[in-house]
Amino acid sequence: MSNVTRARFALGTAAAFASVGIARFPANAAEYPLKYANNLPLTHPMNVRALEAADKIKSESGGRVEITIFPNNALGGDGSMLTQVRAGAIAFYTNSGLNLSALTQACGINCIGFAFPTYKDVWTAMDGDLGAHVRGALEGVGLYAFDKMWDNGFREITTSTGPINGPKDLSGFKIRVPVSPLSTSLFKALDASPVGIDFSNVYTSLQTKLVSGQENPIVVIETVKLYEVQKYCSLTNHIWDGFWFLAHGETWNKLPKNLQEIVARNIDAAAEKDRNDVKSLNTSLASKLKSQGLAMNAPATGPFRDALARAGYYKDWKKTFGDTGWAALEKYTGKLG
């Protein structure tokens, strides 16, 4: 069975659990019952693969470790979940570099606009020195980040008003962005009007016309059904972002070393599978979104990059991230700005 076939089978299986809002593995007998919370539906590849990993961890640990998964903001919005994992109320949490940059600036460095042309560039950087740089920053705020970053995909722009063919189409455009200075500054530099809104309120903000558009990866656009409230999707690939799989530092350190090895190995293996799933789904879901009425276009990225350079966007963020962080980024992207 191929990875894509297995993923689709798993997606259907996961959907059966979605109605109850909490994944399996009731933590009632394990020596180490651990909660994992995130903001995505159970049908998203991240949760599909996390469920598989939880199965294996339970089996390989002889039942000593059981992971209960709370998907789709079941334990609150991103801000609340981040507070909970930092306090130890939950053991594991996944979120994007964009959102985590509010906690420690280094997390957002992979989200610099139009930095990575391809997935090859992304994974070379995030599995290399750039990823190590970010994990060190997370450790400094009491969080353990697993070695492998999970894919969230390149971000695309959807609108209810018309396609985005170039920077001029963003002038004055009211767009939802994550509550993140990186996203806000990117779209301000492109003369848009970004509005920071928590992920749990994206659909409603589009439905009520609070904003005219948003930006997210293809997989997210499809899984949360944004095509129901948007008409156009412009494949700008303006930011690549992924999910850091985080653990509360003290909780992680209390796990015996042999159990840490079991958990880490399975979580990182699941991350690799998630990467393959998302890459495959990007292609198939683009066609599916077209059939669901979302008009697609792929603008050239050069004009956007040039507009950012003229606005001083790259120069300003280099100052923010500092010479060490920026050098780690440009080691993989080449000179920016």
Image (cartoon, grey):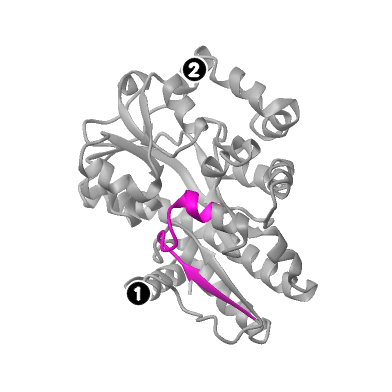
Specify which label sits upstream in the sequence, 2 or 1: 1
Q: Which mark is residue 20?
A: 1
Nearer to us in this view, 150 or 207: 207
Nearer to us in this view, 3 or 38: 38
Question: Does the magenta segment cover residue 98?
Answer: no
Q: Position of residue 167 (x, y in %)?
A: 37, 21
Calculate the distance from the C-alpha at mark 2 to the C-alpha at mark 1: 48 Å
Question: Could one spot residue 323 in this view of the protein?
Answer: yes
What SS does tag 2 mark? helix
User: Residue 258's quadrant in the figure?
Assistant: bottom right
Q: Is residue 307 left or right of residue 284?
A: right
User: Residue 76's quadrant in the figure?
Assistant: bottom left
* Magenta region: 65-82
User: Where does label 2 land, which residue?
Assistant: 306
Circles 2 and 1 in contact, beta carbons < 8 Å: no
Amino acid at circle 1: Val
Q: Is residue 170 above or below residue 282?
A: above
Q: Position of residue 148 (x, y in %)?
A: 65, 56
Residue lying at 40% horizontally and 72% vertically, measured from the top left: 14
